[in-house]
Image (cartoon, rainbow, N blue to C red):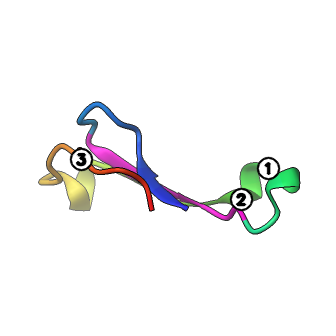
Amino acid sequence: MVGSTGAGAKSVFAIDVTDPTNLDAESILLEIVASGDFADMGNIMGCGI
């Protein structure tokens, strides 16, 4: 699942939900925030996919 933290935040994330009964820290595949290489990231308003 890919989504944002909502309300126009400047971050996105990806979580492996293949087995939703076994979610843990290893299920987090990606988190990108507006800093460093992504400092120009705008506000994210879209829904997760």
Q: Which residue is mark 1?
A: 24
In screen coordinates, is 41 left or right of 27?
left
Please report contact status of discs 2 and 1: CB closer than 8 Å, yes or no.
Answer: yes
Residue 15 locus on image (x, y percent): 61, 59
Q: Name the residue nearer the viewer: 41 or 1.
A: 1
* First of labels 2, 3 by sequence position: 2
Say which of 14 and 45 sits in front: 45
In the orientation shown, which residue stands out farthest toward the bottom?
18
Q: Residues within 10 Å of mark 3 (few under 14, many from 20)?
A: some
Decide: few, some or many residues near mark 2? Use Cα within 10 Å; few <14, some 14-19, many ≥20: some
Q: Position of residue 24 (x, y in %)?
A: 79, 49
Residue at the location (12% across, 54% down)?
40
- For badge 3, the amino acid type reads Ile
Residue at (24% x, 47% y) in the render = 44
Question: What's the distance in space between the residues labelled 1 and 3, CA to CA?
Answer: 25 Å
Q: Is residue 45 left or right of residue 12?
A: left
Q: CA distance from mark 2 to mark 1?
A: 5 Å
Give the residue drawn at x 43%, y 53%. 3
Residue 49, above or below 44: below
Main SS, magenta region, reads strand
Instruction: Kindly report the distance in space between the C-alpha atoms of the residues bearing marks 2 and 3.
Output: 22 Å
In the image: residue 40, left or right of residue 18: left
Q: Which is more N-terminal, label 3 or label 1?
A: 1
Q: Secondary structure at mark 3?
A: loop
Q: Determine whether label 2 and label 3 are within 8 Å by CB.
A: no
The x, y position of residue 14, in whole percent, is 52, 60
Q: Tell which tag, 2 or 3, sits nearer the viewer.
A: 3
Q: Which residue is mark 3?
A: 44
- The segment highlighted magenta reads 10-17
Which residue is tagged 2?
A: 27
Q: In front: mark 1 or mark 3?
A: 3
